[in-house]
Every structure is written in structure tokens, then in C-alpha cells.
Image (cartoon, coloured by chain):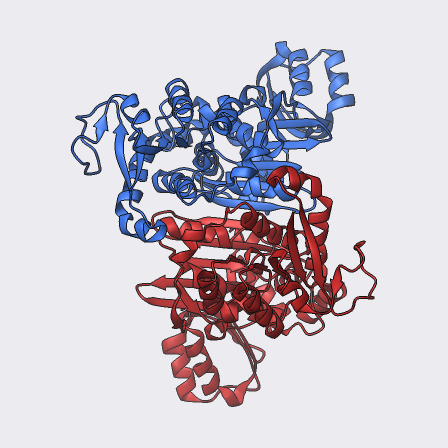
Chain colours: A blue, B red
Amino acid sequence: MIKIGLLGLGTVGTGVYQLISENRNDLKALIGEEVEISKILVNNVSKIREVELEKGILTLNPYEILDDPTINIIVEVIGGVTDAYTYIKYALNNGKHVVTANKAVIAKHMKELTSLSKTSNSALLYEASVGGGIPIIKPLRQYKNMSQVDEIKGIINGTSNFILSKMIDESMSFDESLSLAQSLGYAEADPTDDVEGYDTARKLAILSSIAFNNSINDDSIYSRGISSISKGDIDNFKEMGFTVKLLGKAIKRANQIAASVEPVLIKEKSMLAGVNGAFNLIALNGAPLGELQFYGQGAGKFPTAGAVLSDILDIITCAYPKEICDNNDLATNTTSCQLSGRYYIRINLLGEVTDEEALKYIDENLIDTKINSSKGELTLLTKETTPNEIQKFEKSLNKYVEGCFYARIDE
Amino acid sequence: MIKIGLLGLGTVGTGVYQLISENRNDLKALIGEEVEISKILVNNVSKIREVELEKGILTLNPYEILDDPTINIIVEVIGGVTDAYTYIKYALNNGKHVVTANKAVIAKHMKELTSLSKTSNSALLYEASVGGGIPIIKPLRQYKNMSQVDEIKGIINGTSNFILSKMIDESMSFDESLSLAQSLGYAEADPTDDVEGYDTARKLAILSSIAFNNSINDDSIYSRGISSISKGDIDNFKEMGFTVKLLGKAIKRANQIAASVEPVLIKEKSMLAGVNGAFNLIALNGAPLGELQFYGQGAGKFPTAGAVLSDILDIITCAYPKEICDNNDLATNTTSCQLSGRYYIRINLLGEVTDEEALKYIDENLIDTKINSSKGELTLLTKETTPNEIQKFEKSLNKYVEGCFYARIDE
């Protein structure tokens, strides 16, 4: 009998419990032993649950699970950083294997926890932390054993992608679309992490740390969100044959890593443009293996629980890449720089710009194509530049600017 | 030192040799041991090769490799069925692990070879046999450990997809596009297997045998190719907002499996429509895990060699799912039935149809929308039907029919 300790019984935890208990016989046939969740950490033992539970299986005390010598595998799905970090560390130190779906804790403490899992000879697997039900962590490790990874990019935040899909397909405003996402349970009451790109940055930090053998902190990734996209911007994108996506992208050239999370204009006929609603797509590229893309449900109870169960099965059947993990000696923390590219900029002006120097700068350094410069709005496509340069320019126009939005063109 | 015997030194074999010899140090760091290809089976030892080889490494005698006690892993990349089947069987009987990229031999002998690999306790891995560089066999096995698989579909023949892309994007005829593909090395002198769907049927047979725990023979899969698509058809598709792809699709409902390889009309805005040129896309769907798609280079030296190397690494690090493979007890051969759906039909007529009965049948049973019925051509969209029914109808009009093409609408 293989006993699993489950930390957390929210949506994903309940999904894991259901997948394991409902597939009990199949799992036994598969691995030759019974698998059960024998203890579950919750905040409230008397809350009514969606699943029927054995009496006494719930506990308020994490150490009743973490110190249980009959439990070999810990599944952490409580979310948040502080407690999760404490429990994962304790479990690894105690020689237990750990599976987690927690991107925040992995993005923050990957290097330390990976190294701890090695010294304690325990597995630390986190397939569910990026892309929900999409297998990406394991394929990425395999890919980089056979090829350089030159580029990772992805639509990895379902909430913002849902909002953008509604803005594009149904001409909703950002606020209308956000409200709808909240009412459907796709967005949280405080949507900051999702719509401002922080969630995407965490996932990109995990992927690029693995891909580039580096410890890339999510705080060091330049992130800009989608909340200031206007209906007019969407119309402009359509007219130019583009759609807009919140894209996380990291590239490695020589020893430099550039990574950004930004709204990005994508040609309407490309694969990335076809990723709608709450779906995710992650693309890897490198020499000599070439391009690979993975697409699926980036969140949701069963897809995410499925990724957790896949890690559990890998541990039970020893099918996780033990030795291969060992080359994942992350280098010291790396600060990524911004990606450069041509940008779409829309500026709402308070009045006519009379600053000669600013106008000269725009003409000489920034403008590639002017789209619109009437009715207090200046919209243009730039030459190759970076967000830093655009911010400098925006600052130089500071006293005239009422609002501003810019997005890189994916070329 | 881990010694590998390589059967075949064509494009993929050369790629495998290069990946292993060029990554020698990285592989050693990764797995703690040196890996080398110690013997290679070829047809001609004096042929000039693209890679520099140690003297005496080439042999004309397969048994010098298959009986070598120092060789533990056999990589079969000679292609064809007869010899490959003989060597793989011999190797497994000899207790050696086998990695193959050969879809023909796996489609034909999967059940027997899988069962032999179990009794001899050796791995038989064939990630490269479907989708070239796209990881699909392993993810599919993992998926089905956690979910039902209800549907598999894919664009899994790069040659026909390249030809269709040229017909659609550059208004080439089928013949022009085929000639271009042949001159670029994307199509063989005899393109039958690729353009008539037989190659796709082999790959679909492998995928659906795994997904549905069944031995599905490629001969039992209904296949129809792309060679009779006309420029006029392409124009019609565009006008209706569709593109056309050669799609392999298998579904399971209750205990029935329906599988077909057919030209299929796909909405221009979907992900499948974005798969162009020599790329492949494979989609899995099932409850409760939902949809997953994998996209990448479906052929080519390094993508395919990379998939072979990934299998080799899984064997060396024991990271292939040993126990999990055991549940892959394929049921007895299953004959699949055709998929039903609405169809686009274009018939070139020799003269006016005067057969009252045939006309009545068309009106009452077949036609949903008439697109064109002038100039000796009858083009229509049908109600839900099957290729069998369409063939019956075509036969009933036999004396009037000069040419005919039909394609299912993917809905």
C-alpha cells in the first residue's frame, strides 16, 4: 500500500482525491500496489466537502502528515508561499518525495528546494505548476538533454487570455470582460496577479530556469499587463491583421538571457493567435531539434489534478528522471533583460505637443509608421526599441500624456 | 560504457550518430557513464558518409550486432517491414532493449512485439515512429493512465500537408505542388503512401492501439487521400471559410472504435488550420482530463533522431514506464468503422443526369446545401453520412460521373 499525504483540499486537492479514489482498481492494476490518500491537511475539518471522506482522514496539523513514517509522498496544493515552502522543505528533509502544483513557491525557491531534494535523495516534481494539464516540465527537461533551448514562449495565463478573447471576439471593454471572468470564476476578486502579468512571470521563471540552467527570479522578469488596452486599440490591431495576447517569452543568446511578459501583437493566422479562452500554449525552440508546441487546458480541477497524478505515478514507478535531474545545477540568480522589438504605441494627449525636442526625438528615433495623430491621440508603430526606451520617451512627454499603452509586435 | 548497436545509417541513423557523438561529454555528465554507438549495420561499407566514423564500426552482418554481448541497446532505423521485424524480434528474444523509428513495423506487429518485450523483460520504445520530433507516445501513455481517451486526431503526414499548404497559399495544382515537394526532398518518387493516406493510417493505428488498448491494424482504417482535390475545390473551401487538411481521426464510443484518414474541411480560424508545411499536430481528448495538443516537426533528421535519443535516455536512466507498459495488453485485432459527418462533394458529370431515381435519392437523402450545379459540375454539402453511403450514391450515378472528390467537414 502506497500512502500519500495531501496538503490542501481546495479545487485541485479535491480533483487529486477524486482521480485517485475513482481509479483505485485501475491504479492497482497499473502499479501492482494499492494507492491511497491517507491523510489530508485542511483549515477546517467540519466544512462540508464535495467528496465523501473516511472519518479521521482530515487533520489541522501538518506535522501529523509530514512526520508520519507510513507516508512516503507528500502532495502540496495549499497554494501561497510561506506555509507551502515550510512544509515542502520539512518533507524533503524528512526524506519524503514531494509533488506540488504551487508555481509561486517553486518560482521563489526553486534553487534551494532542488538542491535539497538532491541531498535528501527525494523527488521534487511540479508538472502542474506551469500549464495546468499540459505536460511541459518533463518534456522541457527531455528536450534540453538533446538540444540547446534558444527560446521559450507561451500564453500561460488562462484568465488574461479569456479576457482578451472576449475583448476581441465580442468587442467587450477590459472592465466588462474582467467582470464576466470574475462572475464565471475564471478571475479572482483581486485579479492583479493574472492581468498584470505576475502569474505569467512566475511560470516563465520556472520554465526558463530549467531551460537555461539558471536561477531566474520572477521579480527580475520585466512584466506588463493588459488592463490598459482600449477598444480602439483592439480595432487598430484587427485592421493591421493582428490579435493581442499576453505572452511570456525568454530567449538565450550567448550568455545573456532576455525575458519579458508583455501584451504582444500576433499575426491573426498564426498558431498562437488560435489559442482562445482559458487555453494555454507553450512553445520551445532550439538547435538542432527545432520547434515544439504544447497546447491544452492551462488550469481547471481535473487537468491540474491529472498533472499532479502524473508526477505521483512517475515517483511510484521510478519513472522520473533521477540522474537527469542532477544536471539541473542552477547557476546563481540571473537578472534577465528586456526583449527588444517593434512596438505599437497609443498615447492619449492632453493637448497639442509643443515640446520641439520631444517631437524631434519621436521623429528621429521612434516612429516607423504613424497610424493616427488626431483627436488628442497619437498612435504609431516604432522602429526596434525596448520598453525602457518607450518609458523614457513617455516621460519626456509627461506633461502632455493622459494615458498610454504599448505592445510588442511578435515577428 | 553503454554500447549501442545502430541498424541503418540513412538520414535518421546519421542524425542519431551525430547527436550521440557531438553530445558525448554532456551525455556523460548527465548519466554518469559514457555512451557510444559501437557498431552500425549498413548495406555498403565503402560508401562515402556525411560523418566521420571509426574504422571497422560498419558491418554488413546484422548478427554481429544482435549477438554482441557488450551491446545492450539496439536502435533500428533501416525502415521497411520484413528485415526490421526479424531484427527487432531477434534482439528482444536476445534480451536487448530496442528503440525504433519504424512506423510500418510497429503498425503491423505491435501486439506481438509488445508482448515479446514483456516476456523478455526488455524495453521496446518507438517515440519517433509517430510525429517525428513531437513527444506523443509517452504523453499518450501517461494521459491514458489518468483519463479515458475518447478521441485522437492529427495532421501526421508532413508531405501531404506541405502539398496542401502550397495548393492553398500559392494556388498550385496538386501535380505542381507534388513536383515541388519531390524536388525539395519532401516527397518520394512514389508518393502513394503519403498522399493516399496510408502513412497516416499506420501512425493512427499505432496511436489508437495504445489509446484504446486494442490492436488496430492499419489495413482496417478507412483511408482516402488528397490527389483528386482540384483548384476549384480549394476556391470553394476558401469561400466557405474552410481550409483542407489530411486528417487522421479515431474515436471510441462505448465499445466501438471509428477511425478514418480523409481530407477534411477545417474552419480557417482553428488551431488545426494553422498547421502548415511539413509540421504535424496531434490532439488527444477525453474525460475528465480534457484536450491536449502537441505540435512540431513531424519529420526531419534531427527532430526524429532526437525522439530516438529520448527513448535511449529513458532506457539508460530506467525512466521509461516499465510497470505502466504492462497494462498495455492489447485486445484482439479490432476492425474500425468509418466516421460519419457532413461532407463536401464535387462531381464532374459527363452530361445531364436523367436518372429520376438517382436525382430523388440526392434530393431526399444527401443534399443539405447545393453549391454549384452548372457546367457539368455538381457541388454540394451533404447531411450527415459516411464515405460508404457516398460511394453507393456515386455508383448509382456511375454512367454520368467523370470525376469525384469528397471531404468531411470537421465540426
Residue A231 image offset from top left, x and y in percent: 51, 31
Taking the spot 45% from the left edge, 52% from the top edge, the residue there is: B322
Residue A136 image offset from top left, x and y in percent: 51, 40
Most extreme residue toward the front is B69
Question: In this rendering, would B49 be left or right of B189?
Answer: right
The quarter of the image holding the N terminus of chain A is top left
Give whichever of A208, A180 is nearer the camera: A208
**Residue A338's quadrant in the figure?**
top right
Give whichever of B275, B209 is nearer the camera: B209
In the displayed structure, A273 sits above or below B254; it is above
Residue A292 image offset from top left, x and y in percent: 59, 46
Taking the spot 39% from the left edge, 77% from the top edge, the residue there is: B363
In the displayed structure, B327 sits above or below A332; it is below
Most extreme residue toward the top is A399
Residue B162 image offset from top left, x and y in percent: 65, 60
Give whichever of A167, B210 is nearer the camera: B210
Q: How many labels does the image show?
A: 0
Question: In this rendering, would B277 be left or right of A117?
Answer: right
Taking the spot 70% from the left edge, 43% from the top edge, the residue there is: B23
In this rendering, does residue B380 appear at all?
yes
Give whichever of A399, A272 is nearer the camera: A272
In this rendering, does residue A350 appear at all?
no
**Residue A329's quadrant in the figure?**
top right
The quarter of the image holding the C terminus of chain A is top right
Question: In this rendering, would A108 be left or right of A269?
Answer: left
